[in-house]
Image (cartoon, helix red, strand yellow):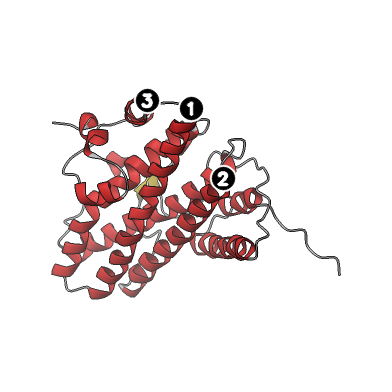
Amino acid sequence: MTAQPTLTLAQMADEVLRTADGREKTALAHKHAATWRAAREAGTPLEIGTATPPMQPARPDRPELLDPRDVPQRKPGSPEGRNAILHAIAHIELNAVDLHWDIIARFTHVPFPLGFYDDWVKSADEEAKHFNLICDRLEALGSHYGALPAHAGMWRAAQDTAEDIMGRLAVVPMVLEARGLDVTPGMIKLFKQAKDHETVAAMDVIYSEEVAHVAYGSKWFHFLCGRENLDPKETFHRLVRQYFHSTLRPPFNAEKRAEAGIPPDFYWPLATA
């Protein structure tokens, strides 16, 4: 039999983006991440290659995607409200899987050290794990991903920054994922009060690993600023004002943001009063 040709990393990323089912997408993400790691550990890294990723990743038929204003609000203290929170988290994590593979596939024309790809493959692999952790909890509680409508605007930041790698790094990890560091402790507290220890354990894993994802964004944003002799803070403010269609909202998790390499003078000037 003729051996199958080895996919490039960009082709692997494109394959994930074109897979609709969430469980299948995350299984493929784990497989490709393992292939990348094994090649790196063997000292024979895969070719990065090129791809033409879709502007919108493949998605399952459910959940129904609604304008954020039309997504039903539920009382967070109720079982239904906690299920709605888990469903929203699963939706965010599935989008995060695609966002991290998209940054690999879409910007291969920008020269980066291999460490850039190491970081985003690792992040994409962890986001796939996070999606499955939350889906497992939804199913254990008698629900599933797709049972409720979800936010239709999650991919807008990717579309807006499809031709601007610095804009992508500024808005996705350094704004959107940093926001997760702000709000996750409150959600963990909610599930602790409900004595849902399994969900708390899952969210503790997510919280601890998301700090590194934000840090990768800050690291490579500063790398590009240094290479292009740009002031990182001024550039960050300019790009967030250009691409992020809202203001940043306190309270901020200053400790975790600092751990991720984002000091207060990056985000406070962009915040609402």
- State whether residue 158 is above or below residue 194: above
The answer to whether 268 appears left or right of 128 in the picture is left
Quadrant location of residue 186?
A: bottom left
- Whether residue 228 appears in this view of the structure is yes
Mark number displayed over residue 242: 3
The image position of residue 137, as x and y in percent, is 33, 70
> Circle 3: is it few (<14), some (14-19), or many (20+) Cα within 10 Å?
few
The answer to whether 212 appears left or right of 162 in the picture is left
Quarter containing the C terminus: top left
Are the residues flagged by discs 3 and 2 in contact, CB closer than 8 Å? Answer: no
* Element type at mark 2: loop
Please report whichever mark, 3 or 2, sits nearer to the chain's N-terminal start.
2
Quarter containing the N terminus: bottom right
Q: Identify which amino acid the numbered label 3 is placed on.
A: Gln
Please report whichever mark, 1 or 2, sits nearer to the chain's N-terminal start.
2
The image position of residue 244, as x and y in percent, is 34, 32
Q: Of residues 244 and 141, which is closer to you in this image? A: 244
The image position of residue 154, as x and y in percent, is 39, 43
Mark number displayed over residue 192: none
> Circle 1: is it few (<14), some (14-19), or many (20+) Cα within 10 Å?
few
Residue drawn at the location 33% of the way across and 66% of the way down: 205
- Whether residue 154 appears in this view of the structure is no
Q: Identify which amino acid the numbered label 2 is placed on.
A: Pro
Q: Identify which amino acid the numbered label 1 is placed on.
A: Glu
Nearest to the eye among marks 3 and 1: give it. Answer: 1
Q: Of residues 157 and 209, which is closer to you in this image? A: 209
Q: Of residues 180 and 165, which is closer to you in this image? A: 165
**Which residue is the site of mark 1?**
228
Quadrant location of residue 135?
A: bottom left
* Element type at mark 1: loop
Mark number displayed over residue 113: 2
Please report whichever mark, 3 or 1, sits nearer to the chain's N-terminal start.
1
